[in-house]
Image (cartoon, helix red, strand yellow):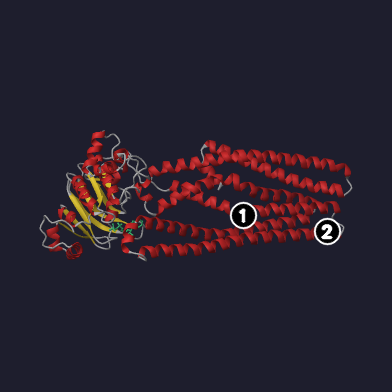
């Protein structure tokens, strides 16, 4: 833990941490000296060396005065170290966050990152002050006092050392086991949290599905599992503490018995016997007090490991001199990609999206539609083949250039806790008020503003929860219109939209796609038919067919099947007339 803290700390952080560690060392040494002085004092008192009694008493006083003073300083400095490290960890993670590929923040990772940034950082930053102190008091004092015991009688010293070593070894073994259980618990907690979050997000769909839907059952099952794991880890945690306490107590009894044996054999003076009994007893108490903090220290270590992992995560390689694209057509050239190295989810996919045209991606759920869109935005780099924009590989264009040249409208729209106006302006920060309002008008956000108490100046709550799913998407379309990027990546949402919203959203989307190179994950039949080209993916993530609606109806069985199914579900006739709309 200390190693990681030194590794991630600034020069100033390291300095204060060093001072804290030095003080912790001084305080533990002073405590050990105080305890030894008490033993010597008792020896002198009962051994008839009255002249030395006063000297040892003064030693004891001085040692405890040093202990108290360093302890007070530790209190003050530990707080500083804690606060400085919290700030440092936040700063490092924030700096890192802007460098990491967008793919890093997808799904489970961002949940984990959230925990690390919030409670984890506070806990880990305060660990040196809060947890090292009792541990060093127990450990260092025991080690120093053992040296004293060796000097008094080597047999007792060796025995005490053996007891200490057994305790430390037992501590390591038992905590390694508890740690493994802790890891399982943390994973379960994360999974349950993600499931509850998802459960809250998809309420509209779930409520429509009625009670005891699959979603509800999944959450209940996850919670039940978490409870079982929690009970198991807690039981093993308690077991560790009580076992270690028992080992320490047993060791104390053994050392006391040995001292008694030496006393009866006349090899240990009665005064020193009393001194040793008291000393060993107090050391045992310090060691027992230290045990629970060992666990805390381990947790802090795990969190810091997590921080280090984020800091060490690889950023995508960026070109030293970004190339310039020729126009804004997009080309997927034999693209293969998997989230895990050995399991590709997109296999050898090739197609072109002409500049200013619209390509609709269709295929069953899990066929890789979103993945292709994310590869176009360089959330990830491909494993094989290439994605090109304007004829240039996105790896040579660089992430910045790629993101600058496209606007994304995905299903999960994040709104910041700011005014509606500012949430749109985020699309392009140098936009004039007129431009913002025009984008709002085109995307149907003006209608939203009219219903809000302060219009565009109404503050939207964090995460945009005070707006409906459809309204949030309209804000996101307005942002994209304002950005006016040559490429648009769309994930056409079907869920969470109400009928009133639908025509406004369609209008906004049409506006957005006009004149721009567009890739759309299409769910609406209208969008699919209207596309210049349709790309059909197989469940295995391979390219099944490419063509227009008419061509594909002729040439692709899968497309025809898909179309018939969709059309039946939405009440369309296959021999459509092009004026017809969904539903
Ligand atoms: P679609 O958009 O067609 O539903 P996706 O591109 O979302 O398909 O997913 C393709 C496959 O990749 C699925 O098997 C999915 O489980 C997997 N997948 C998607 N995103 C991730 C991710 N962030 N990490 C790991 N696997 C993922």
Percent x, y of residue 230: 52, 61
Task: Answer left or right for 384 relative to 147.
Answer: left
- Quadrant in which the C terminus is drawn: bottom left
Separation of residues labelled 2 and 1 (CA atoms): 34 Å
Q: Residue at x 23, y 40 (%)?
A: 439
Whereabouts is ligand 1, in terms of quadrant?
bottom left
Say few, some or many: other residues with alpha carbon within 10 Å of mark 1 (under 14 / 14 to 19 / 20 or more): some
Q: Nearer the viewer, residue 310 or 428?
A: 428
Asked whether the beta carbons under mark 2 and mark 1 sit within 8 Å of each other, the answer is no
Q: Which residue is mark 2?
A: 262
Marks 2, 1: nearer the viewer: 1
- Classify mark 1: helix, strand or loop: helix
Q: Which residue lies at the image location 42% right of the left edge and 42% below the top edge?
A: 94
- Which label belongs to residue 391? none
The answer to whether 366 is drawn above or below residue 127 in the figure is: below
Percent coordinates x, y for residue 348 in the rendering: 25, 58
Q: Secondary structure at mark 2?
A: helix
Q: Determine which of the numbered discs, if any, sits on residue 292 in the image.
A: 1
């Amino acid at each position: 833990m200390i190693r990681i803290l030194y590794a991630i700390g600034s020069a100033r952080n390291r300095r204060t941490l060093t001072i804290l560690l030095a003080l912790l060392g001084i305080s533990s040494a002073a405590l050990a000296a105080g305890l030894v002085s008490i033993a010597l004092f008792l020896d002198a008192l009962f051994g008839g060396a009255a002249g030395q009694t006063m000297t040892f008493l003064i030693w004891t006083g001085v040692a405890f005065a040093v202990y108290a003073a360093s302890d007070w300083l530790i209190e003050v400095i530990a707080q500083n170290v804690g606060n400085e490290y919290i700030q440092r960890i936040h700063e490092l993670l924030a700096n890192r966050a802007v460098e990491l590929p967008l793919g890093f923040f997808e799904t489970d990772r961002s949940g984990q990152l959230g925990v690390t940034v919030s409670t984890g950082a506070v806990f880990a930053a305060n660990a040196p002050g809060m947890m090292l102190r009792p541990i060093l008091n127990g450990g260092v004092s025991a080690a120093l006092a053992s040296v004293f015991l060796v000097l008094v009688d080597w047999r007792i010293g060796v025995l005490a050392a053996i007891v200490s070593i057994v305790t430390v070894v037992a501590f390591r073994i038992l905590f390694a086991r508890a740690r493994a259980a802790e890891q399982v618990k943390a994973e379960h907690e994360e999974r349950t949290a993600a499931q509850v979050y998802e459960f809250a997000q998809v309420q509209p769909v779930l409520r429509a599905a009625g009670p005891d839907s699959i979603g509800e059952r999944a959450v209940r099952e996850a919670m039940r599992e978490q409870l079982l794991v929690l009970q198991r880890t807690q039981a093993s945690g308690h077991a560790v503490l009580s076992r270690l306490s028992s080992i320490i107590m047993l060791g104390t009894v053994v050392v006391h018995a040995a001292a008694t044996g030496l006393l009866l054999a006349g090899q240990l003076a009665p005064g020193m016997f009393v001194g040793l009994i008291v000393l060993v007893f107090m050391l045992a108490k310090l060691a027992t007090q230290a045990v629970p903090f060992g666990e805390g220290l381990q947790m802090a270590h795990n969190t810091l490991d997590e921080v280090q992992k984020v800091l060490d995560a690889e950023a995508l390689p960026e070109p030293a001199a970004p190339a310039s694209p020729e126009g804004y057509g997009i080309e997927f050239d034999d693209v293969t990609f998997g989230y895990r190295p050995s399991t590709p989810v997109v296999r050898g996919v090739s197609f072109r999206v002409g500049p200013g045209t619209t390509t609709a991606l269709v295929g069953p759920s899990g066929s890789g539609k979103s993945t292709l869109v994310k590869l176009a935005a360089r959330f990830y780099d491909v494993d094989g083949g290439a994605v090109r924009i304007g004829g240039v590989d996105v790896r040579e264009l660089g992430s910045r250039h790629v993101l600058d040249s496209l606007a994304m409208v995905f299903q999960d729209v994040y709104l910041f806790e700011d005014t509606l106006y500012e949430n749109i302006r985020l699309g392009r920060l140098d936009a004039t008020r007129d431009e913002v309002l025009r984008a709002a008008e085109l995307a149907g956000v003006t209608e939203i503003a009219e219903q809000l108490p302060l219009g565009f100046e109404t503050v939207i709550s964090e995460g945009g929860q005070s707006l409906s799913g459809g309204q949030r998407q309209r804000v996101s379309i307005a942002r994209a219109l304002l950005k006016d990027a040559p490429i648009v990546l769309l994930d056409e949402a079907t869920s969470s939209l109400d009928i009133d919203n639908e025509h406004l959203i369609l209008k906004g989307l049409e506006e957005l796609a006009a004149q721009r190179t567009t890739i759309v994950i299409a769910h609406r039949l209208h969008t699919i038919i209207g596309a210049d080209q349709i790309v059909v993916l197989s469940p295995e993530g391979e390219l099944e067919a490419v063509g227009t609606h008419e061509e594909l109806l002729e040439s692709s069985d899968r497309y025809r099947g898909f179309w018939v199914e969709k059309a039946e579900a939405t009440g369309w006739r296959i021999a459509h007339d092009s004026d017809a709309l969904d539903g």
